[in-house]
Image (cartoon, rainbow, N blue to C red):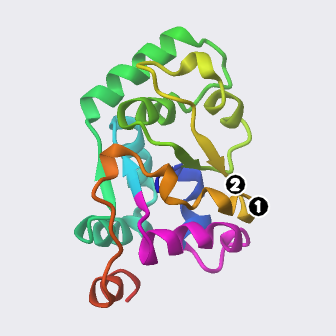
Amino acid sequence: MCLILDTNAFGMFFDKKNSFHHDFEPVLKWVIYGKGKLIYGGTTYKKEMKKASKYIKLFTNLQRAGKLILVSDENVDIYENKLIKKCKDKDFDDPHLVAIIIESGCKIICTNDKRAIPFLKEKSLYMNMVDKPKIYQSKKNISLLSDKYISKICMPCEKLNKEERACLIG
């Protein structure tokens, strides 16, 4: 499975001391021990990543291991701008996430952002015959950690060997 990790979930995903880490740890393990990969791209997402500088080394390690997929920044930015024009709702402050889904065909997004979820579920926002994603919010969504949610952009999708995993988890 490939997924987009909303920047609001970085701490829950990576930080073992975060009170919500237990809900997002299965996804982290799916990326490290399974076939999971993270998808990202676009100017807005990259700006948000830079604000979370304590996770940059982890992202660098995921990139080296082939577990981080960059989609076209230019295309994501174009879709984001179209979405901003299409939806004027003041609560729609994450059009870049929908844009990444449109560009990548990603089927899963991990977020805990209650304001973003109604928009992520809004079918009318998706272009190019892309389905709205499934949303992973907690362990109750563990069934989403499945090969059936692997997007074409993430192929081939293979598990890391022991040495490769050791580079990720130290």
Quarter occupied by residue 114: top right
Quarter occupied by residue 122: top right
Indicate the position of residue 55 as horizontal and vertical percent values: 42, 67
- Give me the disc on residue 102: none
> Could you tell whether 57 is left or right of 88 in the image?
left
| Marks 2,1: beta carbons within 8 A | yes
Depicted 123 relative to depicted 85: above or below? below
- The structure residue drawn at horizontal position 61% and vertical position 21%, both measured from the top left corner, is 123
Depicted 125 relative to depicted 143: above or below? above
If the image is split into quadrants, where does the C terminus sit?
A: bottom left
- The amino acid beneath tag 1 is Lys
- The structure residue drawn at horizontal position 41% and vertical position 52%, both measured from the top left corner, is 49
- Give me the disc on residue 137: 2
| Magenta span | 15-37
- The amino acid beneath tag 2 is Gln
Quarter occupied by residue 162: bottom left
> Could you tell whether 18 is left or right of 71 in the image?
right
Quickly name the residue at label 1: 140
